[in-house]
Amino acid sequence: MALEIERRFLVQLGPAEPWRGHVTWQARLQQGYLSASPEGFTTRVRHDGDGGAWLTLKCAATASQGLVRHEFEYPIPPADAEALLQLSPQALSKSRYGLDLPGGDWVLDVFDAANAPLVIAEVELTSADQDLAVPAWCLREITGQGRFSNAALAACPLSRWDARERRQLLQALGGAAV
């Protein structure tokens, strides 16, 4: 059974972006959610605009508090991905960057449109109890906080959050309040 062991962090905003010095690759992603339940089961379609397309099923693992999930991902034809994106009731877009940080497979997502200026770093680990050196620009861990899942951000983007709550979050991250 495929497991994803992942920790997630909100990233400091502002003109200085120290994470950029760790970028090894980048991709532009379009993601659509065909289903997303409050219990954590999601069916996602993803297209990278460069010929890569995937259908992914995710489900929370028992008592994992968001750290460990079942994940099944399958490559699909790009035309199928485009058709499924059109059928998706919720979607989002972002730029994803691979990072050369130690401790696991790090990626960083810079969200755009209704979720701008949100930036989230994720690291995939080999075990749930693995030691990890978290960079200083990762200001707050959000592992297991459903509100920050990509599926939740597609359904209720940052721009639709309560203005006070959005302002407090962005100020805490060092960004301008919007």
Image (cartoon, grey):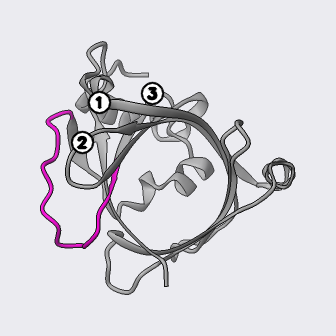
For label 1, the residue is 22
Q: Nearer the viewer, residue 88 or 72?
A: 72
Q: Nearer the viewer, residue 166 or 32?
A: 32
**Residue shown at 28%/69% (left/top)?**
126
Task: Check if mark 3's residue and mark 1's residue have beta carbons within 8 Å.
Answer: no
Left or right of 135, for residue 63: right
**Residue shown at 22%/45% (left/top)?**
140
Disc 1 residue crowd, few under 14, some 14–19, many 20+, Cα 10 Å: few
Image coords of residue 116 (percent x, y): 50, 29
For label 2, the residue is 101
Q: Relative to 174, does residue 172 appear above or below in the rendering?
A: below
Q: Nearer the viewer, residue 105 or 43?
A: 105
Left or right of 51, for residue 128: left
- Disc 3 or disc 1, which is closer to the eye? 1
Q: CA distance from mark 3 to mark 1?
A: 20 Å
Q: In the rendered structure, which disc, 2 or 3, sits on the residue that comes first in sequence?
A: 2
Task: Check if mark 1's residue and mark 2's residue have beta carbons within 8 Å.
Answer: yes
